[in-house]
Amino acid sequence: MILSDDQAYCDLGCMGAQDLATPHLDALAAAGALLRSWYSNSPVCSPSRASLLTGRYPGNAGVRSILRGHRTATGLPRDVPTIATALRTAGYRTAMFGKWHLGLAEGSRPQDHGFEEWFGFMAGCIDYYSHIFYFDMEVGTDPIHDLWENGREVWANGRYFTELVTERAVDYVRRAARAGVPLFLYLPFNAPHYPLHAPAKYLDRFPDLPAERRIMAAMIAAMDDGVGEIVAELDRAGMRDDTFVFFQSDNGPSRETRNWLDGRTEPYYGSRCALKGHKFSLYEGGIRSPAIASWPARIPPGTSVSEPGAAMDLFPTLLRAAGGDTDSYELDGRDVLPVLADGAPSPQRDLFWEMGRQTAIRRGNWKLILNGQLVEGTPASDDVFLADLAQDPEERTNLREDHPELAAELAEAAQTWRAAIEERWAREWRGGAEAATTGWRT
C-alpha cells in the first residue's frame, strides 16, 4: 500500500501529465486498474491517513485534523484497529517505511498500531536530507530530529529520504521472500510534500521546465523510481503475480507558500490540474486522488475504473482478499475488489467528507458541498454548491438553482452525517488526538 503526499490527481503520466515522467507507476497501471474516481477521505494529511489505515471516516477513527509534530503529541487512539493489526492477526508480517503523522507520543506510534517493523518519521514533514522537523516553530516548538527505526532514534544525515524508504522496502520484500511469509507493507512516501528537495540526478531529467514545476517533477520521479525498484524485487522473488499493489495520494496538492523555499509569499501552483481546489478544500482538487490497483492474479491488465471509491475501502478490500473476517471490525469502507477485478458496480452508498466548516457528499454522479472553501483560512466561496461530476468534473457550474429539491435532499443527508460525527467526537474522542493549533498549516 503506497501513499504519496500532496500529489495532484493529474500528476502521473497515466493520468495525462505530459511534462513529467512516471514510467514505473504508468506500467503498474497498465498491468492492473487505473482508478479515475478515487478519493482521499480528507483534504489533509493526518485524517486521510487515519481513514486509509482504519477503514473508517476520520471522525470515527479519532483523527479529524492535522496533528502536531512535537514528541509528546498524541494521535490515532490505540484502541482503533488498523489494517496492519488485522493482517498481523491473520498471519501476515507487517511493516511501515515512510511518513507516519498519526502521533508521536507512546501509544500513538506505528508499533502501537500493528506494525512489527518500521522506519521513518512521525511528524508532518521533515527536511529530506537532515530529517529535521522545522515546521512548528511559530507556536514555540524548536526544530527536532525525526528519524526512527522501530521506536529508536537513528541518524542518516545527508541521505535523501525518498531513497532511504525505497532501500528499506526492497530489503523487506527480499527478507520476507526468503522467510516464505506473507507480507503487508505500507509505504507512505513524503514526496512531493514540502520542503521541495531533490538530488540533481532527478532535476536533470527535466531541464526545460519552470523551476516550480521542475522540482515537483523531480520529486515525483524519485518516488516513481522507488516504486519501480520495489516491483522489480517482487518479480525477482516470484511474488509479483499474487501481490496486491495499491497506490494513491493522501490528498490534493499544496498551494502553501512554504513550497517556494525562496521567501516568496504568493500561493504555490506547482501542479497543473484543472480540478477546482487544492489541499484543505473539499472541492475535487483537494480530495480526488490518483490511484492504481495492480494484482496480476485477479485484476485484468489495462482496466479503467470510473466507479467512485475511497481510501477507507482498502481495509475491507485487503482483509477479505487475504481471507480475513471484516465482521470483527467497525468499518465505514466497503470491499471494492469486485469493482476492480470483475467490473462490478460500485457499492451503493453516499460518500461524505468534512473539514472545518466544510461538509460534502457524493451520491452517484452528484456532489454537494456546504461552505466550500477554495482558499484555506478564508470565508466560504459557496454556502451550497451542487455539481454533476459526470458532466462537470471541474465543478465550474453551480446547479443548486436548477435542482433545488436534490440540493436540499443532499444537504440534509450531509448535515445528518456530520451531526453524528460531531456527537461521537464530543462523546468519545474529544481530548484525544492533539491537533495542530496553527490554523491550516502543517
Image (tube, rainbow, N blue to C red):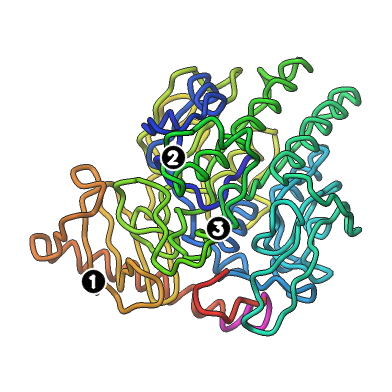
* Picture residue at 42% right of the left edge, 50% below the top: 270
Q: Do the residues labelled 1 and 3 touch (CB within 8 Å)?
A: no
Query: The residue under label 3 is which amino acid type?
Result: Ser
Query: The residue under label 1 is which amino acid type?
Result: Asp
Q: Distance between the residues labelled 1 and 2?
A: 27 Å
Query: The residue under label 2 is which amino acid type?
Result: Asp
Q: Return the residue nearer the eye: 190 or 395.
A: 190
**Crowding near the residue tagged with mark 3, few <14, some 14–19, many ≥20 C-alpha atoms within 10 Å:** many
Q: Where is residue 150 in the image (x, y as percent from the top left)?
A: 88, 53
* Picture residue at 34% right of the left edge, 46% below the top: 273
- Image position of 195 (left or right of 394): right
Q: Where is residue 358 in the image (x, y as percent from the top left)?
A: 37, 71
Foreground mark, 2 or 3, reads 2
Which residues, given as a range, are shown in magenta? 426-433
Where, quadrant-wise, is the C terminus in this rendering? Answer: bottom right
Q: Position of residue 60 (x, y in %)?
A: 57, 66
* Residue placed under numbered mark 3 in the picture: 48
- Image position of 150 (left or right of 195): right
* Residue placed under numbered mark 1 in the picture: 382
Q: Distance between the residues labelled 1 and 3?
A: 24 Å
* Residue placed under numbered mark 2 in the picture: 11
